[in-house]
Image (spheres, rainbow, N blue to C red):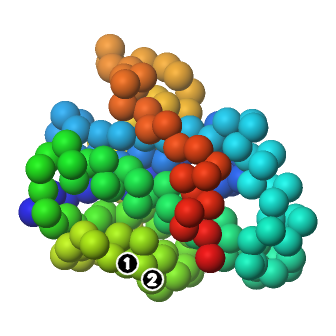
Amino acid sequence: MLEIQIDVSGDDVLERGYCIVAAKSDIKSYFGFKFDEKLVRALKKNYETGKYHYGLSKTGKIYFKIRVYCIIVSILVKLMMKENKSTNAGLYICRDFDGHKEDIEMNLKSILRDINITGFLYDTLPKESAADILAYLLNKGKRIKGKKFDRNRIAHISLSDIEKHIK
């Protein structure tokens, strides 16, 4: 079974520079995604004009953000599974959406229905965890102890890739 850590760096899913990373604990296998201004602007505009079926309320917006987060996580998990030739995975997810564990799990199960997810663990990842370090590196574009985020491991995810999974 492949164990995948999931962590983020940034303040808000709908902000330029927000990063999501999926990684094995040994840092030998990982993928990440960083939101750019064009994607953030398009997602916000489409949400605010009612293109997506999420209410224009505080509650609707948080569910929309959770869905976008889960779509990105799902794409990264699929990349990890393919690279590691694995058919099942356990996800160790940092609690970045406090109080929404069930919503995240439901969304991930829905999007990853063709993958055997053996378990979900929600907790604060330690600062020295692979996913935490890599999310910070991707966000800041810096080196830590000689390590930097390999640009070949940044997933190219388009608006249409995300919209395929927005309800």
Q: Could you tell me residue 153's position as x and y percent?
A: 36, 31
Q: Could you tell me residue 25's position as x and y percent?
A: 21, 46
Name the residue type under label 1: Lys
In the picture of the structure, the residue carrying the numbered disc 2 is 106
Label 1 and label 2: CA atoms lie apart by: 5 Å
Q: Quadrant of residue 128?
A: top left
In the picture of the structure, the residue carrying the numbered disc 1 is 109
Q: Please say whether residue 132 is visible from this viewpoint.
A: no
Of 87 and 65, nearer the camera is: 87
Name the residue type under label 2: Met
Q: Is residue 80 above or below residue 31?
A: below
Q: Residue at x 75, y 71 (%)?
A: 52
Q: Could you tell me residue 159's position as x and y percent?
A: 64, 49
Relative horizontal placement of residue 64, taking residue 42 as reference (left or right): left
Relative horizontal placement of residue 41, taking residue 11 as reference (left or right): right
Farthest residue, direction right? 49
Viewport quadrant of the C terminus: bottom right
Viewport quadrant of the N terminus: bottom left
